[in-house]
Image: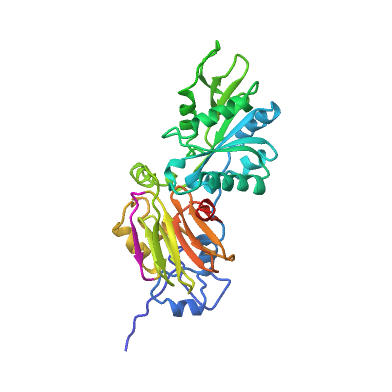
Amino acid sequence: MDQLKKIHRCYHCGAVLQVEYPSEPGYITEKIMETYPEGFLLCDSCYRKEKFSSAAPEVTFDQQYLSILHKAKETDSLILYVVDLLSFEGSLIPDVLQELKNQNVIVIANKRDLLPKNFSDQRLSEYVHERLTQQYNINVINVVLASATNLYNIDKLNDLILQHGKNRDIYVIGAATSGKSAIIAALLKEFKNNTDKVIATTRFKGTDLKVLRIPITNKYYLYETPGTSVENSILSKVEKSVQNALTPRKAIQPKKFILYKNNSVFIGEICCIELLSKERTTIEVFCSEKVQYQIRRHKAYEKFSESIIKEQLSPASNRFTDIKDFDIYDLEIAENDKKDIGISGLGWFTFNGNNQKFRIYVPKGVYVYISRSKVEYANK
């Protein structure tokens, strides 16, 4: 009797899958072929290099920005470093941190109003201070938890600037989404220009970069520098309407889920967290109040493409309609303590580490990180 035999292709590169020749295109282990005969199969090469990456991308860095940092260091200027409490790791730029090594810095931890109110300010400040001093060797003068939205601690920040910025230029630096400009605007509400200079946007000498120059005296200025790149944030990958949905407008209330092996939490239709290990795990997800969630009790990879096309949850982006539009990371937890897994521009989820293995689906190019839990630290 005549028979038709289905030919399987790699879902990513399209090569015909085969189990005999490891060095040839389309090679896949026979065990995988037998285990997932109808799944979204990837050849070994795509599995290793294209999809299940071992390191999420960090942001690129405009080397001209170094000229600004060098000038600040040469002139012994005061540096105000604005970081985003909602995406703390994502707002830290390695090249900037390297330049700030051994420098005296006031850190402005912005968007405090969007974190749960029961978090301890003191513990949050210690968390930020510890990360920047111990890991990056920055001399943190003070950490100010602030909110440009409700002017929280802006008066404290102004006092510190007056104390440490006397007879010095001041440089305000930070990622584009850190709220740096909003902090400057909040400070300017109490600003009195007693000089014969004017506030102006000007090109920084020796670069093509523009800075906002605010006169403090006739000799010294406060410079608002350009925001460093955020192309690895999910906010840079989606439409304006989706950006609005992902941006919290009030204090985040975490959502709690219990995951079993192969259970998944869909965060809108733009992210998915799957538990691959056997150990039951409770996770708390910290995202915008407009984000919808759903538990799926199946292997995420087998249904993810179908799900994102249906757009069952909000937010959903028209830019991601196929599994090929996503990066997939396998994250193995080696330590038994409280951990965060963060997704730049979206939020993070917290859990008790117990040698779990997670699989995270995010739009291509979005930064995923593991860190010590902010929740555990802030609630002590």
Report the residue at 47% width, 41% height from top: 112
Q: Is residue 82 visible?
A: yes
Question: What is the chief secondary structure element of the magenta stretch?
Answer: loop
Q: Residue reaching furthest top? A: 196
Task: Please report the residue visible at 35 percent of the width from the left and 52 percent of the height from the top.
Answer: 291
Residue at the image point whose x is 40% and y is 70% from the top: 299
Residue most extreme to the bottom:
1
Rendering quarter of residue 320: bottom left
Return the x and y of residue 122 as percentages of the image width and height.
55, 44
Magenta range: 289-298
Camera-side residue: 62 or 281?
281
Q: Quadrant of the N terminus?
A: bottom left
Q: Image height check: is 199 above or below 136?
A: above
Whether residue 130 is in magenta: the answer is no
Percent position of residue 267, x then y = 38, 57
Q: Position of residue 61 (x, y in %)?
A: 58, 41
* 357 horizontally vs 255: left or right: right
Nearer the observer, 136 or 141: 141
From this viewpoint, is residue 326 visible?
A: no
Is 294 one of the magenta-colored residues?
yes
Q: How is the image coloured?
A: rainbow
Q: How many marks?
A: 0
